[in-house]
């Protein structure tokens, strides 16, 4: 894998067919498809891969049961089909999860209606859901999920969707792109567009956010895949029309699984406004969310407020009265912006070229291709829609969409050599000479899939890399080496938030490990003391932002 600085050096030195702006799941998916189909491709991301919404979702690959209520059957069909495809492309990352829907007597949506919805949901997956739903009676529900309030329960359908690691899904799509020849330059911000004499966009001016260097990068097509920053990018291109997006904020809270132990995800209706939320088991933790509030600020400064946290806790109090959670139980929070499409009125300087109800691909007169909206689950379809537009603009010869649809199902990197987690974990232990404990081996297998064996090999070469980053937790030093050498990690935050999940899972959000991680990264990347300290400080700021609501609580 080329290093981040090698990627930067290649930018501007190689001819490009397509340059993608934005390294969320949308941009990574486009770069993967474009490079797989022979286009000379670069992706530039101003921060880390998945820095934006793509590491801040509810982490589900799902059909969107709730769309059935609004009659958007086509959309659900599309999403459950994608769920099946992603389960086979990335079985190590997209894993079946049972969802309980407790229905109480007198509920707005009675059990018969919810059950009908479940049958439709299973039927739309052509009965190839991870498992077909069944309905539990109150006593069975109490046995399955002892924390859940069951008095007054009429029944609880149990249906199946998938959980995922959103950041890693993005990362693996980007790595797949690099394997197909794409340049993926992180910490590289587009600051302006380059135009030919007729005003058409023929490239971008970028700045390396780590060194301050700038350069011009030319490409035959430029794609704006900047998620919640879509309107900002369009304004940079001179757009003066109405907004494409109406972003809304969603937050999640993380608590110790011992405080709220769950076997299944539970669908909650908020007691105040009946909004659908989820409580999701997450190994040693449980997370609960999400909220949905308008957001107009800087997308880089999105954070949970005290009101957000209290709103989520209120929902838990209603459903899990025997396990009362307080603000003090919150280990971590995350907040993200949904890049939702604004109501249909379009920007005055845009022509719509492709439409789906969840995402739009627009081409401006100056040639800038923009993709807006969408979700994690449908990233592969979104990429195909964008590639159709790009191919048409470039006049490139491409296989037909049907053929491409098939070929874009290629496995993501960690899926190679992955049968199931237990089997990979066993190999990891053996390869490490049994130096790694079973829980560490399992953690590596479930995080990296088939790639976990390479981390075991690192430990076999240098046993000190098997040391835990935080005492008592399964994350190990080898993950830092792997992140830097194979996953383009360039800052302490990259490692803490998106390569490991210490930011979310560790009681101290990984602050106690930051110095050790920085020292190791500094050794691998040749940092001086100032660069090391700056990277630690940046991480501390990120943790502080996620804890800002606590200051409101104290005030
Ligand atoms: P982003 O991930 O935000 O990526 C855009 C990137 O562009 C950012 O990394 C940013 O740094 C970069 N960028 C911006 N400007 C520039 C520039 N000038 N130069 C270079 N780079 C730039 N979907 C699901 O399928 N399942 C779910 O469970 C789910 N839950 C969700 C829960 C919440 C609370 C939210 C907010 C969303 C959820 N979604 C879910 C939706 C899904 O997460 C998003 O649709 C998806 O992650 C958006 O990806 P993106 O790549 O378009 O945007």
Image: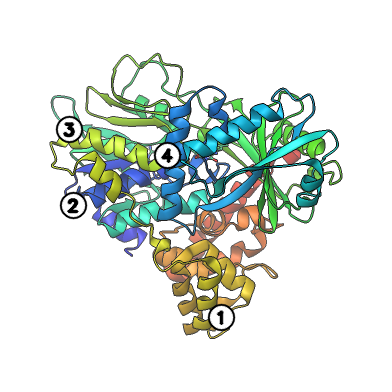
- In primary-sequence order, the first of circles 4 and 3 is 4
Q: Nearer the viewer, mark 3 or mark 2?
A: 3
Please name the residue shown 48% across and 64% down the image: 448
Assess whether mark 4 and mark 2 are in contact (beta carbons under 8 angstroms): no
Residue under the point 58% across and 69% down: 442
Tell me if residue 23 can be seen: yes
- Which mark sits nearer the N-terminus, 3 or 1? 3
Q: Position of residue 18 (x, y in %)?
A: 23, 42
**Alpha-carbon distance for marks 2 and 1?**
40 Å
Query: Which callout, 1 or 4, points at the residue further toward the start of the chain?
Result: 4
Q: Is residue 190 visible?
A: no
Number of the front mark, 4 or 3: 4
Residue plotted at (60% across, 62% down): 514
Q: Quadrant of the N terminus?
A: bottom left
Identify the element where label 1 is drawn.
Answer: helix
**Reading the chain from its start, which is encountered first: label 2 or label 4?**
2
Question: Which type of secondary structure does the marked residue at label 3 adopt?
Answer: helix
**Looking at the rendered structure, which numbered label has been put on residue 393?**
3
Which dot, 3 or 1, sits closer to the camera? Answer: 3
Marks 2/4: CA distance? 31 Å
Lateral position of residue 116 relative to residue 409, left or right: right
Q: Which residue is mark 2?
A: 14
| N-terminal label among 3 and 2 | 2
Q: Are marks 1 and 4 in contact (CB under 8 Å)?
A: no
Picture disc at residue 490: none
Is disc 2 placed on a helix, strand or loop?
loop
Inter-mark Cα distance, 3 to 2:
20 Å
Q: Mark 1 CB in 8 Å range of ligand 1?
A: no
Q: Which mark is residue 378?
A: 4
In front of the other: 4 or 225 = 225
Q: Residue 464 — which label?
A: 1
Q: Which type of secondary structure does the marked residue at label 4 adopt?
A: helix
């Amino acid at each position: 894998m080329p290093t981040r600085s090698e990627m930067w050096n290649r930018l501007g030195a190689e001819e490009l067919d397509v340059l993608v702006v934005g390294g969320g799941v949308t941009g990574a998916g486009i770069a993967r498809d474009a490079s797989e189909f022979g286009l000379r491709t670069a992706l530039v991301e101003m921060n880390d891969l998945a820095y934006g919404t793509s590491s801040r979702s509810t982490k589900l690959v799902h059909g969107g049961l709730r769309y059935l209520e609004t009659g958007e059957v086509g959309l659900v069909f599309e999403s459950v089909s994608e769920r099946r495809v992603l389960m086979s492309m990335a079985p190590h990352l997209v894993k079946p999860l049972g969802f309980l829907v407790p229905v109480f007597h007198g509920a707005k949506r009675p059990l018969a209606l919810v059950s009908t919805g479940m049958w439709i949901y299973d039927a739309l997956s052509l009965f190839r859901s991870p498992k077909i739903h069944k309905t539990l009676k109150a006593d069975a529900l109490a046995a399955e999920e002892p924390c859940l309030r069951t008095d007054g329960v009429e029944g609880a359908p149990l249906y199946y969707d998938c959980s995922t690691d959103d950041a890693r899904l993005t990362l693996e799509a980007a790595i797949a792109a690099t394997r197909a020849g794409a340049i993926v330059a992180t910490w590289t911000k587009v600051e302006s567009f380059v135009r030919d004499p007729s005003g058409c966009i023929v490239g971008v001016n970028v700045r390396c956010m780590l060194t301050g260097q700038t350069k011009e990068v030319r490409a035959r097509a430029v794609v704006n895949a900047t998620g919640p920053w879509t309107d900002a990018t369009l304004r940079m291109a001179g757009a003066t029309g109405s907004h494409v997006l109406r972003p809304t904020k969603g937050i999640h809270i993380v608590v110790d699984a011992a405080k709220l132990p769950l076997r299944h995800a539970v669908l909650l209706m908020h007691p105040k406004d009946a909004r659908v939320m989820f409580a999701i088991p997450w190994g040693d933790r449980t997370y609960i969310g999400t909220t949905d509030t308008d957001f107009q600020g800087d997308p880089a400064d999105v954070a949970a407020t005290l009101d957000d946290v209290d709103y989520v806790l209120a929902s838990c109090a209603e459903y899990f009265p025997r396990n009362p959670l307080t603000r003090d139980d919150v280990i971590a929070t995350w907040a993200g912006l949904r890049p939702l499409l604004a109501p249909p009125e379009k920007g005055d300087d845009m022509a719509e070229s492709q439409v789906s109800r969840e995402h739009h691909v627009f081409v401006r007169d100056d040639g800038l291709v923009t993709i807006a909206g969408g979700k994690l689950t449908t990233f592969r379809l979104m990429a195909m829609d964008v590639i159709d537009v790009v191919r048409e603009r470039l006049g490139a010869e491409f296989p037909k969409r049907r053929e491409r649809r098939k070929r874009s199902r290629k496995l993501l990197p960690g899926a190679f050599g992955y049968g199931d987690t237990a089997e990979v974990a066993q190999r990891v232990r053996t390869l490490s000479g049994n130096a790694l404990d079973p829980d560490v081996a399992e953690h590596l297998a479930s995080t990296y899939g088939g790639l976990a064996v390479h981390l075991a090999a690192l430990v076999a070469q240098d046993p000190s890399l098997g040391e835990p980053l935080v005492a008592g937790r399964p994350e190990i030093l080898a993950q830092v080496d792997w992140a830097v050498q194979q996953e383009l990690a360039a800052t302490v935050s990259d490692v803490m938030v998106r390569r490991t999940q210490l930011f979310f899972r560790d009681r101290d959000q990984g602050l106690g490990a930051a110095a050790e991680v920085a020292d190791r990264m500094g050794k691998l990347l040749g940092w001086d003391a100032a660069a090391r300290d700056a990277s630690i400080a940046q991480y501390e700021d990120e943790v502080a932002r996620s804890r800002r609501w606590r200051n409101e609580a104290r005030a």
